[in-house]
Amino acid sequence: MATTASIYRNGNYSKNSLITNNNKVERPPSVNSNPKNSLKSKSLRKSAPAALGAAKDDTGVPGRVRVAVRLRPRNAEEMVADADFADCVELQPEVKRLKLRKNNWDSDTYEFDELLTEFASQKRVYEVVAKPVVESVLDGYNGTVMAYGQTGTGKTYTLGRLGEEDTAARGIMVRAMEDILADVSLETNSVSISYLQLYMETIQDLLNPTNDNISIVEDPKSGDVSLPGASLVEIRNQQSFVELLRLGEAHRFAANTKLNAESSRSHAMLMVHVKRSVRGRDSDLSSENGNNSRMVKILKPPIVRKGKLVIVDLAGSERIDKSGSEGHTLEEAKSINLSLIALGKCINALAENSAHVPVRDSKLTRLLRDSFGGTARTSLVITIGPSPRHRGETASTIMFGQRAMKVENMLKLKEEFDYKSLSRRLDLQLDKFIAEHERQQKAFEEEIERVTMEAQNRISESERNNADALEKERTKYQKEYMESIKKLEEKWMMNQQKHAGGENIPGLKDESSNAISNGKDSRVANMEELAEMKKKLQKETLLRKVAEGEVNILKSQLAGLKKSEASAKSDISKLQKMLEDEARQKEKLEGEIATLQSQLLHISFEADETARRIDKGGSEEVLGGLDSLMLQVRQPQINDSGNGEKASIAKLFEQVGLQKILSLLEAEDADVRIHAVKVVANLAAEETNQEKIVGAGGLKSLLTLLRSSEDETIYRVAAGAIANLAMNETNQELIMAQGGIRLLSMTAGNAEDPQTLRMIAGAIANLCGNDKLQMKLRSEGGIKALLGMVRCRHPDVLAQVARGIANFAKCESRASTQGTKTGRSLLIEDGVLPWIVQNANSEASQIRHHVELALCHLAQHEVNAKDMISGGALWELVRVSRDCLREDIRTLAHRTLTSSPTFQAEMRRLRIDH
């Protein structure tokens, strides 16, 4: 059965099925896959979609979740085992009805949106289920495609098949990316993906396995869920996308069960982010406003539409008695079933329009919050098998699909402004404005300097010419004036001498009177000449005043020029201040751009490194010796044949050998040690390998790593490997003998990572279940280490702590019943009772059940009764006996209270009815 289930998952149907499938003439798939209607769908994508299915919903309910049923053909094992029995289901695709047979004469009928028989091709499945959702994502809406069903019914084949050998076998993931890349221009738009898995309630990055604990962030306003810690890789072509899918599939957890040889042990989730620019929205801007209109158009950010396609490959639900899961595989199955139950509760609440939807019960329901009852366009394909032996699982799957069809979503267009593009545009415009301003400022400064120099030269020349002219005139007039005065003085002296001589000489009287008359005439002439000189002097003075007026005018013009220069300098300073503000804004934008560029460079580097490793792994042959082994441990996904499948851990074990793998635990390269310890941990999960690992010294090597390493990842993985080995009683004694509990206790005191503490607590919890190791485990600090790890407050860690305390209490109870132990419980002596009482009514069921069980085991020993009464444990015991959801624990608590005289007396005193 396991082999045939694996064959179906890998896409190789039986020979008869293939022949029938190839020769069958397919009827028109539906409105979605008909070529004519595909054209309608293309035209309709320009407007808001009416429903989650085709262009026209059959039931007329807008936004409803569409559900399709896909029937897996019988495999080889079922053909033999069920040869005498008819299929439990009958599909009627023409009327879209499904009949589920109760017996040979009675059946139940259900209606679905689409029915896909065992002969339906992968192309038809894609066109019916996923293509309408992909078209909506290209228009800017969120979309979800999800597969649900029992393990081994073909969910991974439907969604994740790569189709490298047969292109017709390509799954929904590959075909969806082909349509997206064909419709998107990567020059202006972008397509990026994240590939994740939800394993044991932890979100892990399949493209970066070291990122194994991604947190969920919810927007408090919109309620949108995001995963900021997940890798986001941009897709440039289809080949790189297929390589990333291959890489992610190699890191996904799988196990061999009775129902499926390669059963997925985690929920896989592919997120495709499509970002598209919307053009033609600014054409209505009028050009009449000139520069203002152009500026408004520049400042208006472009519109982008961001659609997100989520493709979810859920792990298959399974019944433990049929799958045969045990050990760690059993824990995985429990986690898978719990998350699927939480999803079913949410679907039921949405289908019944309940006021409360329990989306926080599981990380799976939190991640799918937008897909059911949110804003996404959702299409669900449920996969079923024909075997009547699995009729119960088939009926459960069908009812899940029926309830999902009642869920309605409110589709919303994811449209927003592209501020980054606007920033780049404004940055270019700012550079242009700065260059233009610098050019104008330089021209203005040159013009100011030229005018200033020209004015100064003119003023200097005018002042120099005026000064020379005035000096010449002044010298000339002064010289003439002095000469005239000198002549007048000489004449006056001569006249005086003549006048004096005439009085003394009588004969000269007539001559003297003539001389006087002549002197008077001469004086009159001199006075006229002097008046003429004064007129010239006044004229020159007037000319000088005119020249001084011109000089004053030039000085006023110069002052005006200086004021203009000061005003220009003020304008320049304002412009410089504006430039400084713009420069600071530019620096801020450049800083943001640099951050984005560094992030892009880092992502590109990681993508190139991943591609290089993949290319190297696909082309190089395995080298000999230790170097070859290190390469295999670093890259456990290297192909060992040309069929494109990855070498599993078990095949690596067979090829390389256990001794070489264990030798790498002591390698100097930290990455090699991490990969090697992960390989050993995976091997230790299989019970058949545990004896080989311990016999080859693997336990000793793991304990040495705990003692010497300081790497948190090595702590976590090594503790997980030891926890797997500690599930065997013989190995438990070896771990204790080699000081394992002391090392685990020390590691617990130093570790901070919740996953590391969970692994350590799990290892100690396994050791607590050994009756022979009770005293030694307590003396070496095991109980105190468990109690110390509650500081983490992580529910997974607390669950392991509670399990260890329950195991220890169970062993003590058994020893007390057999008479090999007397006295108070060691747990009570170490102070564990207050923590037990505090967490006995924990909201987390996985913690509460273990604590309730521990409480019942402690109460079975009468010597512990007084301590439990004083510590408040009696009230919790009474509550457990009344309200516990598990009947076995409730019965045990009731029996313990009834059989204890001390508890009976205290309940009578407190008047507690029981």
Image: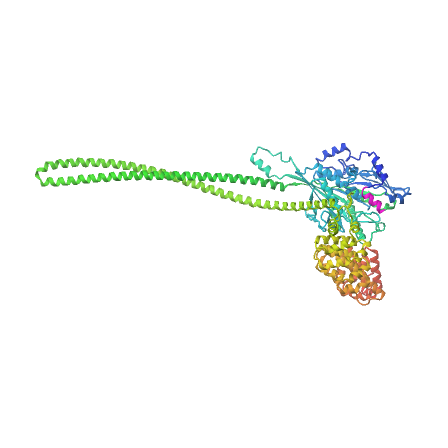
325 and 376: which is toward the camera: 325
Q: Is residue 552 left or right of residue 199?
A: left
* Dominant secondary structure, magenta: helix
Whether residue 777 is visible, yes or no, is yes
Q: Look at 42% across and 39% down and name the residue there.
A: 453
The location of residue 913, given as percent across then percent down, is 82, 61
Q: Look at 83% across and 36% down and name the residue there.
A: 22
350 and 854: which is toward the camera: 854
Q: Is residue 592 left or right of residue 802?
A: left
Q: Is residue 653 left or right of residue 585?
A: right
718 and 544: which is toward the camera: 718
Q: How many marks?
A: 0
Q: Look at 51% across and 44% down and name the residue there.
A: 576
> Image height check: is 278 above or below 893?
above
592 and 825: which is toward the camera: 592
The location of residue 628, given as percent across then percent down, is 74, 50
Whether 5 is among the magenta residues is yes
Quarter of the picture containing the C terminus is bottom right
Q: Is residue 898 left or right of residue 176?
A: right
Whether residue 854 is visible, yes or no, is no
Q: Quadrant of residue 532?
A: top left
Coloring basis for residues: rainbow
Q: Look at 66% across and 41% down and name the residue there.
A: 416
**Magenta residues, start to end:** 1-11
